[in-house]
Amino acid sequence: MNKSLFLLPALLASAIAQANEAVDLPDTIVTASRQAESASDSSAATTVFTRDDIDRLQPASVADLLRRVPGMSITTTGGIGSLTSLSLRGTSATQSLVMIDGQRIGSASAGQASLEFINVDQIERIEVVRGPRSALYGSDAIGGVIQIFTRQGSDGLNPRIKLGVGSNQTYTRELGLSGGNGQTRFNLGASLNETAGIDRTRHNADGDQDRDGYRNRAYNASFAHNFTDDLEVGIRVLEQSGNTEYDLFGNPEDDFRLSTVATHLQWQVNDVWRTRVEAGHAEDKRDSNYDFFAFAYNTYRDSASWLNNLQLGERNTLQAGLDWYEDRLNSTSAFNQTERYNQAAFVQHRYDAERFSTDFGWRHDDNEQFGHENTFNAALTVPLDTNQQVIASYGEGFRAPTFNDLYTAFGANPDLQPEKSKSYELQWRGQWDDTQLQAAAYRTDIEDLILLDPFFVAQNISSARIHGLELSAGTTVLEWSTLVSATWLDPRDRESGKQLPRRPKRLLSIDTDRQFGVVGLGFSLVANSTRYNDLDNTQKLSGFGTVEARANWLMSDALRWDLKIGNAFDKDYRLANYNYNGQTYAYQNEGLTGNLALTWTPQF
């Protein structure tokens, strides 16, 4: 790849520092501290995608949207509906926590969230917190936390219908109704998306030369009611199910079901104390069917939390809470144990002085399998002037071993301990004439990484060191609203010095959009440098860059046309390899694609 491409953020940042028009950036986030706060007041590095962003960017999947996050790289195994994993700040796919409406959705057996099965039509908002958050959330939050919020109601009565058609026999349909008033809000939605897909593999044998299709049926419902100005209750339900095909011997396909239920009661007891009780249930079911056999890995998770916020005077805020969840696994494979619980208590304190602010937090987890784990975080924020601030922070994280690591009939090790991390970060944020600039430098050390030994038994035998630098900028240049992010990473195995697998060292993302009256145009560029498919760094995956173009036409106040051209230059690129009959091949990705959609949203 042309290395000069990665100089573009610095050149652009220099140019846009003189811009006078603002890009509309969301400024409220919940995930960073488990309570609503201004993103500018949060000590965490964050990225937020609103429903307006989703409609404008027209992502084909959650992964397609998240690839814009600074420090985020995505690996897929062949188009929409294929196995998808993310790496946030150089960590692995199992080292970042993924939630839907506050519910953990990672598989108890594999530890990875099924991002490929989440339909973007059902999403209201996504918040990404970059950096460790185990002192708030416990296990898995080493690289960060991704929280997906499903659709919710707003004032009035708002029906919506969306119909779309695209390349590879892709069809999308969505139907929804939302509404509310000052006291009650609701949303009901359903969607059906399907595609004939592409041939995900490159070898030609048996039935592996056909297309690998994907079908997703999704339903969501939410309801919230304020009994008084101080008392609110709510519930959110999401269910997604369908089928995805892939290439292996025996013509395999997976039937899946991913669902969550989240309820809450929030009470502003007085001017000092606000309390919130949450309870929920999540399921991740995957039934793999071959010509001659089938197997299943189904995760069931129940959870409950009690959160309390205390405003102790003008400068001190104290947050304290209790968490509990239980994982249960139902599988056709043999496991020595099929359930375990985790209970935890945490406390966070914030102090706001005239010239600085501090954050301190501590959490204690008690896990049925491995016992006790303590995590700590701290941050110091110092304003340089009215437009700039510097944040220094330290955070600890851990990842609990999965059921595959601990309890499988072959290769399990019940004596495994959690993977543990320590992260150090320095951020700078600035804003001039509504132009926002951010930079973050960090180091993460991870110990007791779990790998298989020569006898294929899981052991705590590895460690990693990750250095990173993130730059991002947002402004309007010549009436083009532009967001740019660039990341430099050095993710290394500390024993061998090799680059960690499937993690590029340089990433770049650019989104730019402009509205010409009733017509909008936009372009995106995503570029990744070289990565390796294996820990020994023998299978090199070349760097690449892809470009997409999009347009919209507001035909009327209620009708909107959207057009998207994906991979506009038909780039052939590789994200992961696989082996077949002793040969190494790369999974295929979608080439040039086109999608056209019509959305009807009348207002009543």
Image (cartoon, grey):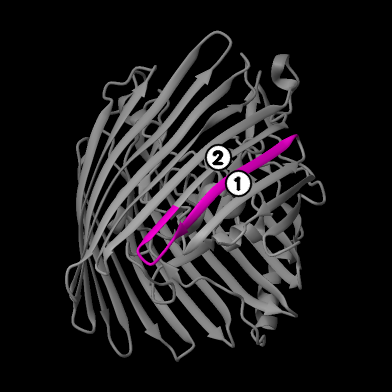
Q: Which SS class for mark 1?
A: loop
Q: Quadrant of residue 247?
A: top right
- Whether residue 174 is visible, yes or no, is yes
Q: Quadrant of residue 341?
A: top left
Q: Nearer the viewer, residue 356 or 448?
A: 356
- Circle count: 2
Is disc 1 surrounded by few (<14), some (14 to 19) or many (20+) residues within 10 Å? some
Position of residue 107 measured from the top left corner of the image (x, y, whole percent): 40, 35
User: For the residues marked 2 and 1, what is the alpha-carbon distance in whole angstroms?
Assistant: 7 Å
Q: Is residue 95 above or below residue 437?
A: above
- Whether residue 500 is visible, yes or no, is no
Position of residue 420 measured from the top left corner of the image (x, y, whole percent): 32, 49
**Label 1 is placed on what type of residue?**
Ser
Query: Residue at label 2?
Result: 116
Give the residue displayed 59% in from the left and 43% down from the top. Answer: 75
**Circle 2/circle 1 CB separation < 8 Å:** yes
Query: Residue at label 1?
Result: 61
Horizontal placement of 286 versus 408: left or right? right
Q: Is residue 150 above or below residue 525?
A: above
